[in-house]
Amino acid sequence: MDVILFLIFAIIAVVCAINVVVQTHPISSAISLVGVMGSLAILYLTLGAEFLAAAQVIVYAGAVMVLFVFVIMLLNAGAETKKGQSSMALFLGGPLLVALLILLVWFVQSRYSETVHFGGFRGGSAQDVGRALFTTYLLPFEVTSILILIAILGAIVLARKEMD
Amino acid sequence: MSGVPISWYLTLSAILFTLGVAGFLFRRNIITVFMSIELMLNAVNLSFIAFSYRLQQVNGHLIAFFVMVVAAAEAAVGLAIILTVFKNRQTLNIDEIDSMKN
């Protein structure tokens, strides 16, 4: 049961991620990315991260991707043109990427043989995350709020109409 | 009933990260490049949460939470920059946005 559930959502995530990369139209990539994020939220749940699964759906699949789709619609972005494709990136980057993937997979497969049982970790609820957030991680949390404020101001300054 | 090895989660994370790097390297649309960055951040978050399960600690969740917050801020600023670039140059192709080259 555990394995089947993992495999279903892992395959959905990988297929959607491949779709993000190969689709030429940005709106298709954005919809595929929502699929990746949704299936990742389910995988977070299987690892006991309940709060983060909810945050993933709300923040990523909700807010960030809506922002992306808005910008794509606003700019009326069409399909990508083929001109200017650098063949250097393909011939050098492709084998390097495959090497990176093989190295990473070999590394994690040779270690970390423990198994995950659903419900095997109960420390990821909103209560536990909130307690850690407001005790151990209070300073980073406050710094994050400043960061968000700066990001809002930056976005307003960048996107407003130019005034003389 | 057998569980899922934790290395499978990490392998999935590695695959997603590599796909994100591939999109970042091979795509020419600036919005798709940006989405590839989000894909990489998500892959790393999955690793953090898998390790958090392995250590039976909540700390990995907090790191993933902060990554999520920073990604949201980054998306807001980055998309504003894309809007400004498009307003000035009428293109989304990253090969044509080269005014800092010369």
Image (cartoon, grey):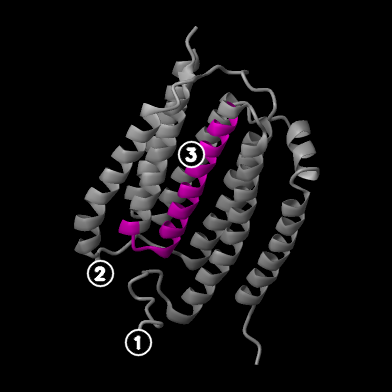
> The magenta stretch spans which residues?
B25-53
Which numbered disc covers residue A154?
Answer: none
Of all residues, the one furthest to the top in this rendering is: B1
Chain of the residue displaying label 2: A
Which numbered disc covers residue A84?
Answer: 2
Residue at 50%, 69% (x, y): give it: B82
Q: Position of residue B16 (x, y in %)?
A: 41, 41
A83 drawn magenta: no
Judge the density around disc 3: few (<14), some (14-19), many (≥20) Cα neighbours within 10 Å.
many
Of all residues, the one furthest to the bottom in this rendering is: A164
Residue at 59%, 52% (x, y): give it: A64
B34 drawn magenta: yes
Which numbered disc covers residue A35?
Answer: 3
- Chief secondary structure of the magenta portion: helix
Circles 2 and 3: CB distance less than 8 Å? no
**Amino acid type, residue under disc 1 in the picture:** Asn
- Does residue A159 lie above or below B8 as drawn? below
Using residue A158 as the reference point, say whether residue A11 is left or right of it: left
Residue at 58%, 18% (x, y): give it: A118
- Does residue B42 lie above or below A112 as drawn? below
Residue identified by numbered label 1: B102
- The lab-note entry on whether marks 1 and 2 share a chain reads no
Q: Secondary structure at mark 1?
A: loop
